[in-house]
Image (cartoon, grey):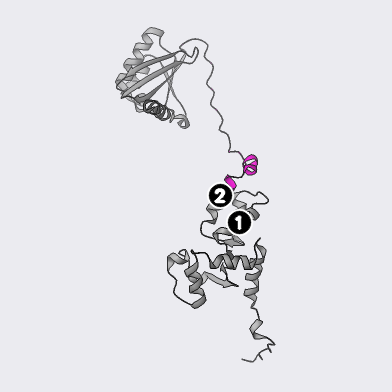
Amino acid sequence: MSRIPLLRTDPENEIEESDVVELNQIETLPLTAEELSQATSGDPLVKNLVQGIKYGKLVEGKDRFGIERNEFSLQKGCLLRGIRVYVPARLRKRVLDELHSTHYGTTRTKSLARGYCWWSGIDRDIEEMVSNCADCQIVRTEPAKMSLHCWETPTEPFQRVHVDFAGPFMDTYFFILVDAYSKWPEIKVCKSITAESTVNMCRDIFSTFGIPSVLVSDHGVQFTSETFQLFLRMNGIVHKMEHRTTQHRTDKQSATFKQNENS
């Protein structure tokens, strides 16, 4: 109440401080205000939103991207969300190229974009741009490699054997046993993959080649069942299981069999 209003020489041309910030944001983009204004006026996605801001009309949620109406404003015909400039579809490639001119990664590029511009789906567009950039893919950080588990080299045949099931292929399964020393495979065609049938197939193979010292399998229920475990104990066979990261091998083999069947 005690302050005396300052004299305004030209009230019509006076620009508020918030307007200056918004105009500066527009000027930081590789576009002119005129280009943005023209493209925005012809953008059907924001037509209703722009009209609502201009004339104080109610704007439905679908026309404002589900964002609160008071987050948007207009400057020289350019639409802004906060201090971020809305970029119409036909100008976005130029903005994306500028953002990615230094070939920052996805996270850094998104962070840079959030300070200047906005449109619905901008994060997705940045991710796609970086993933399709040959230079970025060359220098990107490779995922950490998992250390491989190396089995001890056997010194004689049937010292250690590896077993697994493949299929189904034409309603048939295949029990596969491989000798770790000679790499000799034994394959049994079967209709059932129960613990009992697995024991019978192992017994048949062992009667020909001898009883192994170690048997390696995945965590399949037929191998972890009490029936199969009892069979191993009675024959003095040590049971070792592969790491869970290799458990899906049978599923991949099954998919391969199905693909071959379809072809």
Relative height, residue 73 to residue 125 (above, below): below
Residue 50 % position (x, y): 51, 71
Q: Amino acid at mark 1?
A: Ser
Label 1 Cα neighbours within 10 Å, binned few <14 / some 14-19 / many ≥20: few
Secondary element under disc 1, as helix, strand or loop, is helix
Residue 90 % position (x, y): 56, 58
User: In the rendered structure, which segment of residues is drawn in magenta?
Assistant: 128-157
Report which quarter residue 218 is drawn in. top left
Q: Nearer the viewer, mark 1 or mark 2?
A: 2
Report which quarter residue 248 is drawn in. top left
Label 2 Cα neighbours within 10 Å, binned few <14 / some 14-19 / many ≥20: some
Q: Quadrant of the N terminus?
A: bottom right
Q: Is residue 243 left or right of residue 232?
A: right
Chief SS of the magenta region: loop
What is the number of the mark on residue 111?
1
Front residue of this view, candidates 145 and 227? 145
Q: Is residue 81 visible?
A: no
- Residue at 63%, 44% in the rendered image: 136
Count the numbered circles shown.
Answer: 2
- Residue 135 falls inside the magenta stretch: yes
Q: CA distance from mark 1 to mark 2?
A: 12 Å
Residue 56 % position (x, y): 48, 77
Q: Which residue is mark 2?
A: 127
Q: Amino acid at mark 2?
A: Glu
Front residue of this view, candidates 23 and 163? 23
- Residue at 56%, 68% in the rendered image: 79
Report which quarter residue 112 is drawn in. bottom right
- Residue at 65%, 65% in the rendered image: 32
Q: Quadrant of the C terminus?
A: top left
| Of pointers 1 and 2, the one earlier in the residue sequence | 1
Q: Residue furthest top?
A: 208
